[in-house]
Amino acid sequence: QVQLVESGGDSVLPGGSLRLSCAASGVSSGYCMAWFRQAPGKVREILGAVEDDGATWYIDAVKGRFTISRGNAKNTLYLQMTSLQPEDTAIYYCAAARQLGYLCGEYIYWGQGTQVTVFS
């Protein structure tokens, strides 16, 4: 049984930093994990993912600013965000997918989301 619970969302000023956490159960091995966000009036987008072997990737919009990592026990996923700007305002979600060989499957397991607001 896969369960994901995000926490750490807050309101910050531009240029600030924030770390989100995702407490995960049932995903200790054999899963890819990812962070998504959905801004008001916009489609949900993936930000990046960590594969079961620890490899990570990011979309260009957050590359160099956001870092995805896992706790040693692989039961916690983190999103470290720096240089936050108003356009980063969104609900942030963690998600999990089965590791399918060299690829990640569909992200079908989701947390409830946590709000990040970056004020002008």
Image (cartoon, grey):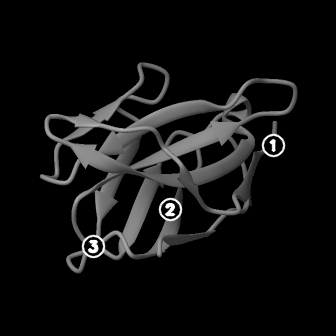
Q: CA distance from mark 2 to mark 1?
A: 17 Å
Q: Where, by quadrant of the figure, is residue 96 drawn?
A: bottom left
Q: Which mark is residue 19?
A: 2
**SS for dot 1:** loop
Mark 2: secondary structure: strand
State left or right for residue 58 relative to residue 101: right
Residue 81 in the image, given as x and y percentages of width and height: 49, 48
| Distance between mark 3 and mark 1 Cα atoms | 36 Å
Residue located at (64% from left, 49% from top): 92
Q: Earlier in the sequence, mark 3 or mark 2?
A: 2
Front label number (2 vs 1): 2
The type of residue carrying mark 3 is: Ser
Q: How many marks?
A: 3
Q: Amino acid at mark 2?
A: Arg
Left or right, 42 with respect to 104, comes to right
Would you say 85 lies left or right of 49 here? right
Mark 3 touches mark 2? (CB < 8 Å): no
Residue underneath mark 3: 28
Judge by depth and name the residue closer to the eye, 84 or 23: 23
Q: Residues within 10 Å of mark 1 (few under 14, many from 20)?
A: some
Q: Secondary structure at mark 3?
A: loop
Provide residue 115's location: percent of width, then percent of height: 75, 56
How far apart are the alpha carbons under marks 3 and 2?
21 Å
